[in-house]
Amino acid sequence: MMLSKYLFYLFSILAIFSSVMVLMSKKPIHSVLYLTLAFLAIAGHFILLNAQFIAIVNVIVYAGAIMVLFLFTVMLLNLNFSVEQKKPAIVRFSAVIAAGLLFLTLTGAMKRTDVLFNGIYVNSQIGLVKNLGKVLFSEFRLPFEVSGILFLSAMVGAVMLGKKAGD
Amino acid sequence: MQDITQTITHVPIEHYVILCSLLFVIGVAGVLIKRNALVIFMSIEIMLNSINLLLVAFSAYHNDPAGQVFVFFVMIVAAAEVAVGLALVVMVYRHTHSIDIDFLNKLKW
């Protein structure tokens, strides 16, 4: 059963490639489409980890709702032009250097720690909807309700910001 | 369906750490490099997703459901953030006819 290993590397390469292409694309609409591809690759990772609920929610929320928001913004503002002002070369160069140093720090810190996990074969069942729902509606009941209030306030804020000042 | 729930992974957790660090770093570089506000939002989404993946990986490897519940809340906050943020982008575009963040250096209208 080595299939999951190959699928892991396939999804990893797909996610990294499409994330880089989000930054490399000239047009914003291509960035949005590559971002959708990256989200789908990460949803594939979730399925490999047997986190089915999170995978489905990821597809619905990110690849569905958030992508529609981005695409509507690109469409409403008519942003599909390819001439984009770029930052100075020194800023871009130092940004890439800084990001590379951050990556080295993160992975280097992992090399010096103890073994993160001893087992080799992981067969996790906690990501199923049944098991996760039990935890979500018992232990995390209050945060769940509070997040509803957060959504309501976000909706009110978006509507208030979106309407014209005169109305 | 039974096969899907029996998924066994052979991938060491270190590979997940490296993958998620790489995705996070790509997001950081995007925030630093780009001037288009929309692409900066997309980079933030990449960073949030990489953290989500790492939380799910650790929670699956350690059999702790709290990590996946946290991922759920991160997604909720990300959705609210995108809704408000894109409304802000639309408002900025109405005022300046551009979504270039380097024009937003006045801090007053």
Image (cartoon, helix red, strand yellow):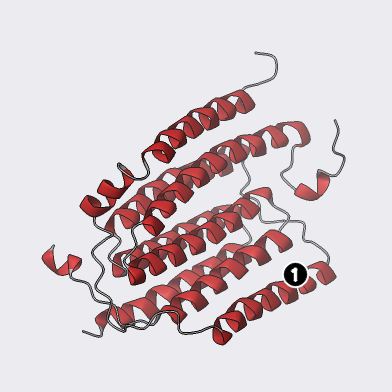
**Residue B50 seen by the camera:** yes
Residue at 18% over, 70% down: B6
Q: Is residue A71 in view? A: no
The picture quadrant where one finds residue B34 is bottom right
Residue at left offset 34%, top offset 55%: A54
Q: Is residue A34 above or below residue B75?
A: below
Numbered disc 1: secondary structure: helix
| Above-or-below relation of B54 to A158 | below
Residue B28: x and y in percent read 65, 64
Q: Crowding at label 1, few (<14), some or many (≥20) Cα neighbours within 10 Å?
A: some
Give percent across and percent down for residue A130. 21, 51
In the image, B96 versus A105, the foreground residue is A105
Residue at x-position 66% and y-position 39%? B89
Label 1 lies in what chain? A
Instruction: Say left or right for A137 vs A146.
Output: left
Percent position (x, y) of residue B5?
A: 19, 65
Horizontally, residue A67 falls left or right of residue B30, namely left
- According to the image, label 1 marks what residue? A95
